[in-house]
Image (cartoon, rainbow, N blue to C red):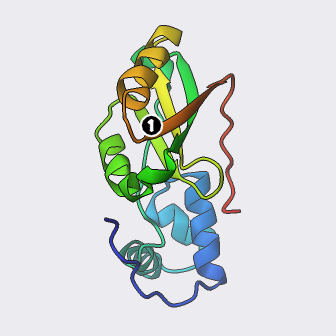
Amino acid sequence: MPEPKKIRPPLDALDHKLLSLLVADARATNQSLADALGIAPSTCLARLKALKETGVIERFTIDVDPEALGRSLQALISVRLRPGARHLMQSFAEDLRSVADISQFFVLAGTDDFLIHVKVRDTAHVREFVLEHLSSNPAVAATQTNLIFEHVWGDSLN
């Protein structure tokens, strides 16, 4: 179960600017961030620490080219659980967390219950994934697989 969000004060213009700078370059040094914001490095560091401690900044990540890891195919798989299996959503989500091929997944409102992003070797691998982890699960009513031709990242906070 996710941790409850910490109570946080509203973000001001400086916080928004700091976050924008980090979205553009998460590896920026504290000194370069402070210079860009026109504040002292100690103030910048305190702001950054507060953004992390209050959960505004959830994590720092790297983006690895999946092809470099032998994962040349990506897919989005929609999953709908059986109507009588809605009480299993939490345990289904927990099971998904342990599957190595899953890059990320979303719990949805609407027709589908989950959207799963996988990075796999080829079409046989995505078929194997669906059969092993989804279709064989008695809680799953239906799946739909969409292959990703291109993934474009945004560089804004919006």
Is residue 61 rendered to the left or right of residue 144?
A: left
Quarter of the image with the C terminus in it: bottom right
Q: Residues within 10 Å of mark 1 (few under 14, many from 20)?
A: some
In the picture shown, does residue 3 fall above or below 81? below
Which quadrant of the structure image shows residue 15?
A: bottom right
Task: Work out whether residue 106 or residue 138 is closer to the camera in this orientation and state it.
Answer: 138
Q: Residue at x 46, y 31 (%)?
A: 64
In the picture shown, does residue 122 fall above or below 5? above
Q: Which residue is mark 1?
A: 103
x then y, percent, for residue 94: 31, 50
Task: Work out whether residue 16 or residue 37 is closer to the camera in this orientation and state it.
Answer: 16
Q: Residue at x 47, y 9 (%)?
A: 124
Task: Work out whether residue 117 or residue 32 is closer to the camera in this orientation and state it.
Answer: 117
Q: Residue at x 46, y 79 (%)?
A: 47
In the picture shown, does residue 20 fall above or below 140? below
x then y, percent, for residue 1: 31, 65
**Dot 1: element:** strand
Which quadrant of the structure image shows residue 29?
A: bottom left
Which quadrant of the structure image shows residue 139?
A: top left
Q: Is residue 74 visible?
A: yes
> What type is the residue that disc 1 sits on?
Ser
Q: Is residue 38 visible?
A: no
Q: How many marks?
A: 1
x then y, percent, for residue 103: 45, 37
x then y, percent, for residue 147: 63, 23
Task: Work out whether residue 10 or residue 1 is closer to the camera in this orientation and state it.
Answer: 1
